[in-house]
Image (cartoon, rainbow, N blue to C red):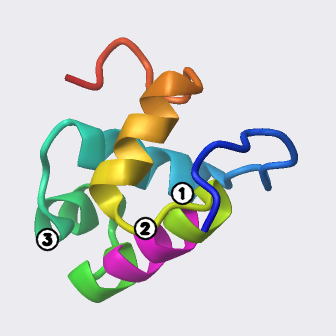
Protein backbone atom coordinates (compact mmCIF):
# COMPACT_ATOMS: atom_id res chain seq x y z
CA UNK A 1 0.00 0.00 0.00
CA UNK A 2 1.55 3.28 -1.11
CA UNK A 3 0.85 6.01 1.43
CA UNK A 4 2.84 8.63 -0.45
CA UNK A 5 0.88 9.06 -3.66
CA UNK A 6 -1.88 11.65 -3.41
CA UNK A 7 -2.76 12.05 -7.07
CA UNK A 8 -5.71 10.26 -8.56
CA UNK A 9 -7.72 9.92 -5.39
CA UNK A 10 -11.36 9.01 -5.86
CA UNK A 11 -13.62 11.88 -4.67
CA UNK A 12 -15.56 11.38 -1.46
CA UNK A 13 -19.35 11.52 -1.32
CA UNK A 14 -21.05 13.97 1.04
CA UNK A 15 -21.79 11.18 3.50
CA UNK A 16 -18.17 10.04 3.40
CA UNK A 17 -16.97 13.62 3.96
CA UNK A 18 -19.33 14.08 6.91
CA UNK A 19 -18.31 10.78 8.50
CA UNK A 20 -14.63 11.69 8.07
CA UNK A 21 -15.19 15.12 9.63
CA UNK A 22 -17.01 13.64 12.63
CA UNK A 23 -14.34 10.96 13.00
CA UNK A 24 -11.68 13.68 13.04
CA UNK A 25 -13.57 15.34 15.88
CA UNK A 26 -13.22 12.15 17.92
CA UNK A 27 -16.79 10.96 17.68
CA UNK A 28 -17.61 7.26 17.88
CA UNK A 29 -19.36 5.37 15.10
CA UNK A 30 -22.50 5.37 17.25
CA UNK A 31 -22.37 9.15 17.75
CA UNK A 32 -21.74 9.75 14.06
CA UNK A 33 -24.61 7.44 13.19
CA UNK A 34 -27.02 9.26 15.46
CA UNK A 35 -26.06 12.58 13.88
CA UNK A 36 -26.34 11.31 10.30
CA UNK A 37 -29.23 8.87 10.86
CA UNK A 38 -27.11 5.79 10.13
CA UNK A 39 -26.33 2.71 12.19
CA UNK A 40 -22.88 2.36 13.77
CA UNK A 41 -22.23 -0.51 11.38
CA UNK A 42 -23.11 1.68 8.38
CA UNK A 43 -20.74 4.38 9.64
CA UNK A 44 -17.95 1.82 10.01
CA UNK A 45 -18.62 0.66 6.46
CA UNK A 46 -18.61 4.21 5.09
CA UNK A 47 -15.32 4.95 6.86
CA UNK A 48 -13.81 1.73 5.50
CA UNK A 49 -14.62 2.92 1.99
CA UNK A 50 -13.07 6.31 2.80
CA UNK A 51 -9.85 4.59 3.91
CA UNK A 52 -9.80 2.61 0.65
CA UNK A 53 -10.28 5.79 -1.36
CA UNK A 54 -7.49 7.49 0.57
CA UNK A 55 -5.32 4.39 0.08
CA UNK A 56 -4.47 4.03 3.76
CA UNK A 57 -4.55 0.99 6.08
CA UNK A 58 -6.50 2.45 9.01
CA UNK A 59 -8.39 5.44 10.40
CA UNK A 60 -5.41 7.08 12.05
CA UNK A 61 -3.47 7.08 8.80
CA UNK A 62 -6.62 8.22 6.99
CA UNK A 63 -7.13 11.17 9.30
CA UNK A 64 -3.47 12.16 8.99
CA UNK A 65 -3.60 11.97 5.19
CA UNK A 66 -6.94 13.81 5.02
CA UNK A 67 -5.49 16.59 7.19
CA UNK A 68 -2.38 16.79 5.01
CA UNK A 69 -4.56 17.02 1.89
CA UNK A 70 -6.72 19.78 3.42
CA UNK A 71 -9.83 17.59 3.46
CA UNK A 72 -10.68 18.37 7.07
CA UNK A 73 -12.39 21.66 7.74
CA UNK A 74 -11.48 24.10 10.52
CA UNK A 75 -14.06 22.50 12.85
CA UNK A 76 -12.27 19.14 12.85
CA UNK A 77 -10.29 19.26 16.10
Circle number at residue 30: 3
- Picture quadrant where residue 69 is located: top right
x, y percentage for residue 66? 49, 36
Q: Nearer the viewer, residue 1 or 75?
A: 1
Q: Give residue 28's quadrant in the image.
A: bottom left
In whole angstroms, how far apart are the C-alphas of marks 3 and 1?
A: 15 Å
Question: Residue at (27%, 39%) from the top-left corner?
Answer: 24
* Residue 48, position as x, y percentages in the image: 46, 75
Instruction: Tell me if label 1 and label 2 are in contact, CB under 8 Å.
Output: yes
Residue extent of the magenta highlight: 44-50
Q: Is residue 18 above or below residue 45?
A: above
Residue behind mark 2: 47
Describe residue 29's horizontal placement relative to residue 21 as left or right: left
Q: Main secondary structure of the magenta part?
A: helix
Distance (Cα) linking label 1 and label 2 = 7 Å
Q: Is residue 26 left or right of residue 47?
A: left
Give the residue at mark 1: 16
Query: How far is disc 2 from disc 3 in space, using C-alphas?
Result: 13 Å
The one nearer the camera, 3 or 55, is 3
Q: Are marks 2 and 3 in contact (CB under 8 Å)?
A: no
Residue 13 % position (x, y): 67, 55
Label 1 or label 2, whichever comes before in sequence order = 1
**Element type at marker 2?**
helix
Dot 1: element: helix
Mark 1 against mark 2, which lies toward the viewer?
Answer: 2
Asked if the magenta segment contains residue 19, the reply would be: no
Amino acid sequence: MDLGKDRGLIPLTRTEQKCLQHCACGRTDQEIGEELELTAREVASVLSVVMLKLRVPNRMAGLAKAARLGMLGPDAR
